[in-house]
Every structure is written in structure tokens, then in C-alpha cells.
Image (cartoon, grey):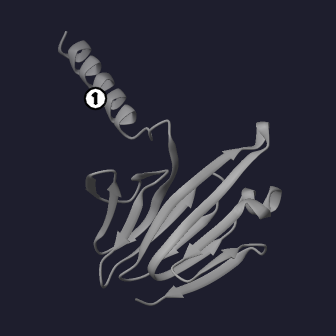
């Protein structure tokens, strides 16, 4: 009897762990790497990011003065943020079945590296990176930007 109860408990515990690690349905990517302090502003909430944290459309990602973060989007694009950076994920749409693509970010400050994923191959004209004094339409596969305050 103890074995059955223990087995049932372990099954329920593992199911709850897998449910807890399931990203939200509206997730557009996740934090893949992280060093130091990284926060995500989501509406009026400020969340402390960790590896595996889902990112959503309209999130603002901020790194501390000695911190960095790596983000992988659902189309396998990768974004890297250096120290003291702020990035807004303004718009993202990855729906190849319907031919709908959009990748718009705003780099407010700091350093930012971008390597394109599937959107860059299928619809490169739908990628736009905005900065305080310029907007870049990405047509290549790699980009490194530094925005000073």
C-alpha cells in the first residue's frame, strides 16, 4: 500500500513540475542564458528573470550594470543583451502556415546582438529594430548594435 501511495505521490509531483515549466500559450521566446540581474517589465509587474523564463510580446527586458541575457525566440532568432541594456519586444508574429511574420524590437540603451532565425529567411522585410535616433530594417543574418544614453 505504501508503494502505491508513494508512486501516486511521485506521479502527481512530476506532473505538477512539468505543468509548471510549460511556457504560456502567448510565449514568443524564453531566456536561454543569464548572468547577473535581469528583470522583465510585464505591464505593471516587474519580474526577476531566470533561465527558462518565457518572454511575451510587449515585455521590456533590462540587464544590470554587470549583467547579460540571451533570448531565443520561437523562430530560433537569438538576441543577446549586454550590461545595462533595455530592450522592448514591441511586436512578434511567427505563423508560417498563414504567412504572418513580424519582429519589431526597440533598443532603448546598451548593447544588443541579433542573429536571425526562420523569420529572417522567410520574410526579412518584417524585421525592424528601432533605436532612439534610427530604425534598422534587417536584411542580413547578424547585427550588433550599441545605443548610448
* Mark 1, residue position: 13
Residue 22 x/y as whole percent: 43, 38
144 horizontally vs 88: left or right: right
Quadrant placement of the N terminus: top left
Quadrant placement of the C terminus: bottom left
Residue 35 figure quarter: bottom left
Count the numbered circles shown.
Answer: 1
Extreme residue toward the front, this view: 133
Say which residue appears at 21% left-offset and 15% top-offset: 5
Residue nearest the observer in this picture, 149 or 46: 149
The correct choice, above or below, for 42 with respect to 13 in the image is: below
Say which residue appears at 82% left-offset and 56% top-offset: 122
The correct choice, above or below, for 7 with respect to 55 in the image is: above
Say which residue appears at 30% left-offset and 78% top-offset: 64
Say which residue appears at 60% left-offset and 61% top-offset: 104
115 horizontally vs 68: left or right: right
Extreme residue toward the left, this view: 2
Extreme residue toward the top, this view: 1
The correct choice, above or below, for 32 with respect to 52 in the image is: below
Q: Which structural element holds mark 1?
A: helix
Residue 134 x/y as whole percent: 61, 81
Would you call the spot at circle 1 few (<14 residues within 10 Å), some (14-19), or many (20 or more)?
few
Residue 141 x/y as whole percent: 74, 73
Amino acid at each position: 500500500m505504501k508503494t502505491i501511495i508513494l508512486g501516486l505521490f511521485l506521479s502527481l509531483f512530476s506532473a505538477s513540475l512539468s505543468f509548471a515549466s510549460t511556457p504560456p500559450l502567448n510565449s514568443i521566446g524564453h531566456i536561454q542564458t543569464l548572468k547577473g540581474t535581469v528583470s522583465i517589465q510585464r505591464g505593471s509587474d516587474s519580474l526577476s528573470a531566470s533561465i527558462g523564463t518565457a518572454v511575451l510580446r510587449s515585455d521590456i527586458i533590462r540587464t544590470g550594470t554587470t549583467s547579460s541575457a540571451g533570448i531565443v525566440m520561437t523562430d530560433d532568432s537569438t538576441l543577446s543583451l549586454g550590461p545595462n541594456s533595455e530592450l522592448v519586444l514591441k511586436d512578434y508574429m511567427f505563423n508560417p502556415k498563414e504567412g504572418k511574420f513580424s519582429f519589431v524590437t526597440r533598443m532603448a540603451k546598451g548593447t544588443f546582438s541579433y542573429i536571425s532565425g526562420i523569420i529572417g529567411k522567410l520574410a526579412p522585410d518584417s524585421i525592424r529594430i528601432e533605436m532612439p535616433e534610427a530604425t534598422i530594417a534587417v536584411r542580413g543574418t547578424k547585427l550588433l548594435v550599441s545605443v548610448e544614453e
